[in-house]
Image: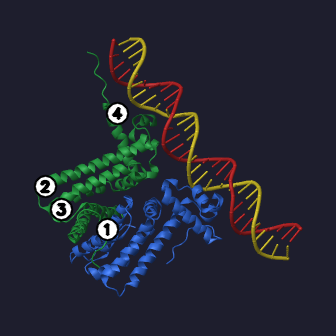
Chain colours: A green, B blue, C yellow, D red
Amino acid sequence: MHAPRKQAAQPRSRATQAAIVEAAARILETSGSAGLTTNAIAARAGVSIGSLYQYFPNKEAVLAALLRTKRAELLSWMRAAVSANQEAPPEKALQALLDAGMRHQVERPRLALEAEYAGQQLHLAEETAALADEMAQLILETVRRLQPAAGLQEARDVVAIAKGIINAAALSSEAGGPGLAARVRRAVRGYLREIPSNSADSRAASSSMP
Amino acid sequence: MHAPRKQAAQPRSRATQAAIVEAAARILETSGSAGLTTNAIAARAGVSIGSLYQYFPNKEAVLAALLRTKRAELLSWMRAAVSANQEAPPEKALQALLDAGMRHQVERPRLALEAEYAGQQLHLAEETAALADEMAQLILETVRRLQPAAGLQEARDVVAIAKGIINAAALSSEAGGPGLAARVRRAVRGYLREIPSNSADSRAASSSMP
DNA sequence: CAAGAATGTGAATGATTGCTCGCATACGCA
DNA sequence: TGCGTATGCGAGCAATCATTCACATTCTTG
């Protein structure tokens, strides 16, 4: 009969919170981490600094929220790619996965670059490692359909290879297009084809053919 | 090759200059770019801030000098690898090149990572692009011995692939060892093998904008 | 409506930074 | 020894930033 118990969520707050995070993203994109000040974020979000500190305990928390958002987005895209291609030929499944992985980098290259670096100095090492693991696991199923001998390490390498080419493109302001996608696919396919059949999933053994 | 030096004061002691640069390197390595303050650099180098500003016009110049030093080092290692393996089998030449490329990253992983990022916000875009070009050219000869259809874009991709795997290893604190080297080699070899024979020319040239 | 709670505000605070400048020391040379 | 110059020094200045807090505005509810 009394007022409904106050739930933890604050409806209005969620939208403002998102606005602040998006403001931080836009600043990172246009000015890099050097321009990412709390006052700038608040101004861009259309709130006062005082309000910003009502939604986040400090600047780091804003950045952490941004990273988490972006990472969740990426993971969900990749998961969608996997489940949508469960029955499709492996080549097509891999392509979908790579497209998903390229998407956020291609959409906002500068942001992806800055966020990745900024996350490094944040205290998110654990989450970062967890994400890497989850991505590797996700990829592994598809990768194994192309190269049954592949293991977790190989899956991680596939991610690293794709990231390397995409980052290089972003750094030289190359537009992400079919050409870039084709090169990433070539690199990944070539790498997978090269995997020795005994390398399984544990750490790669050092000795290989001369 | 000489680039016009920045208008810094004529240094009396090149050794002091080098000490300052090395101090900056050590700070980047241990504390990241966040800890890289002019006072910290001076203290680590064993000079006063006043003296630091006698050798460099500003903080940026110290970082620029560090980057130039590291880059020159890398290039010279790669050049040495090429000329030492001019007559050797292509596989061995590639291996030497990759080893050279891995060397500074393996010796001081954190420094390589931080320096690369720091250089991004510096006004060294031109030099960075020039370095990338020079590295691609350098690699191209050797790469062509393994895959004659390869072009500049493929050489650049080889660099990007290697960087991607090595950076991922550094980020996850994996030690650089024979295992890592083997994986890089596998990735590069696989990529080269995958190049279609008609892609040699500048098919993917859509980025140049100095 | 009234009053208390929730939410919003932005000038003030304290810490840190890049950098300057007046002065001290070392050195060269008569 | 005296004097000019090159070099080294570090306290202090101005700017910037993250964060706080006393107050204003809006919402909720009896």
Residue kind at label 2, given as amino acid type: Gln
Q: Could you say which quadrant of the image residue B43 lies in?
A: bottom right
Q: What residue is disc 1 on? A: B161
Label 3, label 1: how far apart the Cα atoms are: 21 Å
Q: Which mark is residue B68?
A: none
B92 or A160: nearer the viewer: B92
Whether callout 4 and callout 3 share a subunit is answered yes
Q: What number is the disc on residue A13? A: 4
Q: Amino acid at mark 4?
A: Ser
Mark closer to the observer (3, 1): 3
Residue B194 is left or right of residue B207, and the answer is left
Residue for point 16% across, 59% down: A93
Q: Residues within 10 Å of mark 3 (few under 14, many from 20)?
A: some
The front one of D1 and D6 is D1
Disc 3 target residue: A144
Q: Chain of mark 3?
A: A
Measure the alpha-carbon separation of dots 4 and 2. 39 Å
Can marks 2 and 3 be said to lie on one chain?
yes
Tell me if residue B197 comes above or below residue B64 in the rendering. below
Which residue, given by chain and number where applicable, does mark 2 sit on?
A86
Separation of residues labelled 4 and 3 (CA atoms)? 44 Å
Chain letter of mark 2 equals: A
Question: Are the residues flagged by discs 3 and 1 in contact, CB closer than 8 Å?
Answer: no
